[in-house]
Image (cartoon, coloured by chain):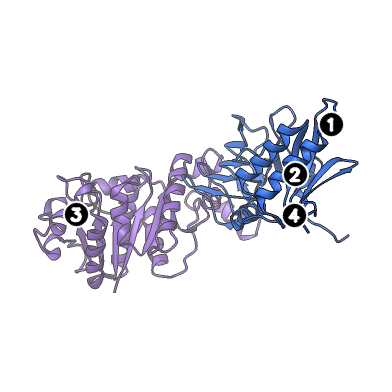
Chain colours: A purple, B blue
Amino acid sequence: MGEAIVVTSGKGGVGKTTTSANIGTALALQGKRVCLVDTDIGLRNLDVVMGLENRIIYDLVDVIQGRCKIHQALVKDKRFEDKLYLLPAAQTSDKTAVQPEEMKKLIDELKQDYDYIIIDCPAGIEQGYRNAVAGADRAIVVTTPEVSAVRDADRIIGLLEKEENVEPPKLVINRIRNHLMKNGDMLDVDEVTSHLSIGLIGIVADDDEVIKASNHGEPIALNPNSKASIAYRNIARRILGESVPLQQLDSGDEGMFTKIKRFFGVRS
Amino acid sequence: MKNTQNVTIKGTKDGLTLHLDDTCSYEELKKELDRKLANTSKAQEEDRLLTVKVKVGNRYLSHGQQEELKDLIRQKRNLLVDVIETNVMTIAEAEELRQENEIVSVARIVRSGQVLEITGDLLLIGDVNPGGTVKASGNVFVMGSLKGIAHAGCNGNEQAVIGASSMKPSQLRIAGCISRAPDQLPNEDGKAMECAYISEDQQIVIDRLQTLMKIRPNLTRFEGGR
């Protein structure tokens, strides 16, 4: 019996879809059977980010309305040996085409066959959000270090805490710009976590490679040389229960001298 | 036993007190009160309004009956009923009173979009985040940081106060008064342990927590001891 994890944020554009795609990919790289579910009906993106757009035949709404079986709608990612599947959202209907109970039934069915179901939630707190959360066991809240994103994350955490079947949510801080944080022009990691007071499961630095990779339809987690990729792989390992220390944000651009200073315990 | 008095009038240094016996029927009591007040009406002719206390012992009077007695006394003479003291109240009234005087402790974070509303005093063990609201009919005390909206005395109690370990509210409301945070905080951290109350000129004032014991001595409920 697998686990369903919903990736949500409240605010749009903070990186829910990118995070879902990369956590899913990283879990598959760890040898788990993963199914990604896009619940953003009407504005689907996850298939594009995964590069599986042109292989879609049936979608989520087809499954729920009984026009096909689940396995017919699942798109297999050929880069992985039978590990990663995608259930795409419909592009032609809207969020009201699905009810939370139907969604829960669908997710429960998928849990029989997969280790992890990653549910990509649409922005907002309306029907689309309720559908996405209905079948989830765990929740990951994505935010950026911006006041507006943190405010919406706070709202969504409040709503998630009311859900009885969902464990307390975990936080991913996305798109961290180190130089802004250092100068105090952006909220820092401590400020965000102490404000939201939930467990932190990962921090991801803002990286041009992420945008490039998703435009090519290849999740960044496949590229082992990028910092963001390591960050997503770390999140996947923490989901699996390993304890992995947080990534050093400035390790990339520090010189030899600072390293030596740190070695001797001198604070810069 | 017929000539036992059901109504006795006593004068103390604080004014007159009407003792109404609690073993007779309400109708009997009304009749006798009527007669008694009429009897003695010649005793004092001056027009000065006297306030009287009414003690009814172990008799339960409904709101209607209380009004009736007040009217009766008011009509007869230049007497004005100050209070009606009774030893009994209904369970509903007692429950209301208990809730009003209770400190309700809540351990949680009030997040954006959430409203926490309680009767009595609120002791919040946690934060109020921006966009969150706490409301209490009594005082509000926040053990964590108050960054949202706090409304104390929301049923109109102007004596209510708000206290917080870290006072950085977006809005403070006490009874009907509303105050908004300054657009730019003078110092970033906000001083530790502050309180807010309504001053004499009907303004919400933020001050050190320690001033509260001077301006709101009623906050102390501890009795006895040293």
Left or right position of A126 against A83: right
- Alpha carbons under labels 2 and 1: distance apart: 57 Å
At numbered mark 1, what does the secondary structure look like: helix, strand or loop? helix
Left or right position of B83 against A130: right
In which quadrant is the N terminus of chain A drawn?
bottom left
Q: For mark 2, what is the residue?
A: B209
Q: Earlier in the sequence, mark 2 or mark 4?
A: 4
Q: Nearer the viewer, mark 2 or mark 1?
A: 1
- Alpha carbons under labels 1 and 4: distance apart: 28 Å
The amino acid sitting under disc 1 is Lys
Q: Nearer the viewer, mark 1 or mark 4?
A: 1
Q: For mark 3, what is the residue?
A: A88
Image coordinates of residue B169 in percent, x first then y, are 60, 39
| Chain ID at mark 4 | B
- Alpha carbons under labels 3 and 1: distance apart: 96 Å
Q: For mark 4, what is the residue?
A: B57
Q: Residue at x 53, y 55 (%)?
A: A197
Q: For mark 1, what is the residue?
A: B42
